[in-house]
Image (spheres, rainbow, N blue to C red):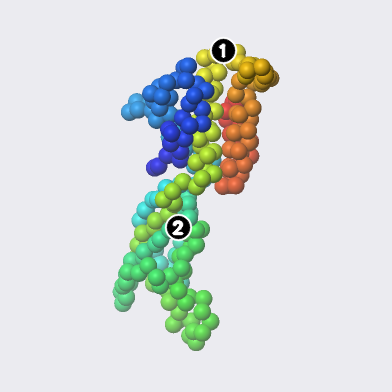
Amino acid sequence: MQDLCTFEDVQSLIGSDVADLYDATALQALCDGDTDTLGLIEAWSRWFETQVDRIFDLQTVTYYLSGRNTNMVMLPDVPMAPIVSMTLEYQSLDNSWTSSTNFGYSDAGVIRLTGASDRSFDNRSDMPRFARGVNNVKATVTFGSATVPPDVRKAVTYLCAIEVLAQYSRWLDKGIKSRQLGDRKEDYGSGGRFSQDVSKWQEVVDKTLLRWGGGVGVAAAHMTG
């Protein structure tokens, strides 16, 4: 499965802010992980996909379905992403074909032969149908997306950044509650130096989760729990 953001995304967002603890090499190791350690990017990518119950990658799966002498068959489980393409291989005693065009399908996994709902048939027996059989319909289904949606990429970048900053803040013990910028002082309250950024990022993550079918407040609860 593909990661939903990159190390460069995270580095661009917070790299200079945590440079005293994480140089570029250390930050990349934290984000990308290694053979023994799961990186933050992969961990938060899989977490986000679990929350919205879909994947953001191209996947090809083969299903073997059984005809019931009707015009329709259904995939045993709904793909976790929009269907991009589908090919059917059908076999019966008197007919067999392979096609990607003589049927329609929905993202819910319903496959219906073209013309099956056409009322022009004089005799119901003339309607196209899948003969009764066991695993006589082979469906090769490609679903997902070749590119990560921009809002999802941003949300997962924020999740990774929040985690890095959480570790950074623990290293700082009580955090930095204010900082001096020339003759101007910025006060960040009790949440430490990054509290305002983190609050905004969590809000973006929650809105993105809601947009893709996940829960509201999940990210904030997960980060503080």
Secondary structure beneath disc 1?
Answer: loop
Secondary structure beneath disc 2?
Answer: strand
Residue 127, compared with residue 55, is above or below; it is below
Disc with the residue nearer the chain's start (2 vs 1): 2
Residue 112, compared with residue 42, is above or below; it is below
Q: Nearer the viewer, residue 21 or 185?
A: 185
Residue 145, compared with residue 34, is above or below; it is below
For label 2, the crowd category at 10 Å Cα-Cα, with few meaning under 14, some 14 to 19 and many 20 or more, is many
Tag nearer the camera, 2 or 1: 1
Please state the horizontal and vertical placement of residue 9, each as a whole percent of the image: 47, 35
For label 1, the crowd category at 10 Å Cα-Cα, with few meaning under 14, some 14 to 19 and many 20 or more, is few
- Total numbered badges shown on the rendered structure: 2
Farthest bottom residue?
Answer: 122
Disc 1: which residue? 173
Disc 2: which residue? 83
For the residues labelled 2 and 1, the Cα–Cα distance comes to 48 Å
Amino acid type shown at disc 2: Ile
Residue 88 occupies which quadrant of the picture? bottom left
Instruction: Find out whether the residues at labels 2 and 1 contact each other: C-beta distance under 8 Å.
Output: no
Q: Residue at x 43, y 33 (%)?
A: 7
Q: Is residue 64 visible?
A: no
Q: Quadrant of the N terminus?
A: top left
Amino acid type shown at disc 1: Asp
Q: Nearer the viewer, residue 15 or 117?
A: 15
Q: Residue at x 54, y 44 (%)?
A: 151
Q: Is residue 225 visible?
A: yes
Please state the horizontal and vertical placement of residue 190, each as a whole percent of the image: 67, 18
Decide if residue 87 is on the left or right side of residue 117.
left
Residue 193, compared with residue 153, is above or below; it is above
Q: Quadrant of the C terminus?
A: top right
Please state the horizontal and vertical placement of residue 89, each as a whole percent of the image: 33, 66
